[in-house]
Amino acid sequence: MIEAVTHLAATGAIEGIRGIVNATTTYILSAMGEGRSYDEALREAQEAGYAEADPSFDVDGRDAAQKLAILASVAWGRWRPETDVMTSGIVGVPVATGETVRLVAEATRDGMTVSPMPVAPNDPLARTAGVESMLEITVTGAGVFRMSGPGAGGRVTAGAVYADLARLVADERPILFGSR
């Protein structure tokens, strides 16, 4: 996601970023939309390895807020701390069977929010389920760019760590650390 935002920021003015960037909450909210309670959904996520033993970082929205702050910093070229993100988590959020609620992260030059909200069936974000993540990047004069895929689980996490290690071995610096 960082690389996509970096490239799009270099080619045009990013108007906004919107997405589902925390797979743990997507898993829990998806299960609740299928009729399970929050506690049942959380237990399933923990048993499947998608949620930590202490899930508060995810369910309180802090993980999504930190990711959004990083993406916004890259998009607009200045550091935007997590403390600038208006954040609400998913604990205590009611989800009716059949309803699609997601923890949505949104940023513009003027502000950033992370909050659970109902997502309309025709909204592309409604397609996220289980451990899927999705990011929409709106670029002036070019439209909306979307990327999606799994955001949690052993194989996905191992792949991300391997990619980072391969970059370091190739003497590439991660994007957030700037140039040499």
Image (cartoon, rainbow, N blue to C red):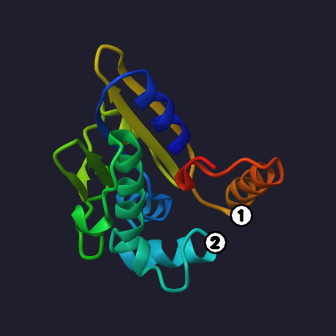
x 68%, y 60%: residue: 157
Viewer-proximal residue, 137 or 59? 137
Left or right: residue 14 versus residue 111 is right
x 51%, y 35%: residue: 4
| Badge 1 or badge 2: first in the primary sequence | 2
Identity, as a three-letter code, of the amino acid under mark 2:
Gly
Residue 19 drawn above or below residue 140: below
**Residue 91 makes an appearance in the image:** yes
On the image, the x and y values in percent for residue 37 come to: 37, 73
* Residue bearing mark 2: 49
Left or right: residue 24 versus residue 83 is right
Q: Do the residues labelled 1 and 2 touch (CB within 8 Å)?
A: yes
x 42%, y 71%: residue: 58
* Residue bearing mark 1: 154
Viewer-proximal residue, 118 or 82? 82
In this rendering, the label closer to the viewer, 1 or 2: 1
Mark pair 1, 2: CA separation: 7 Å
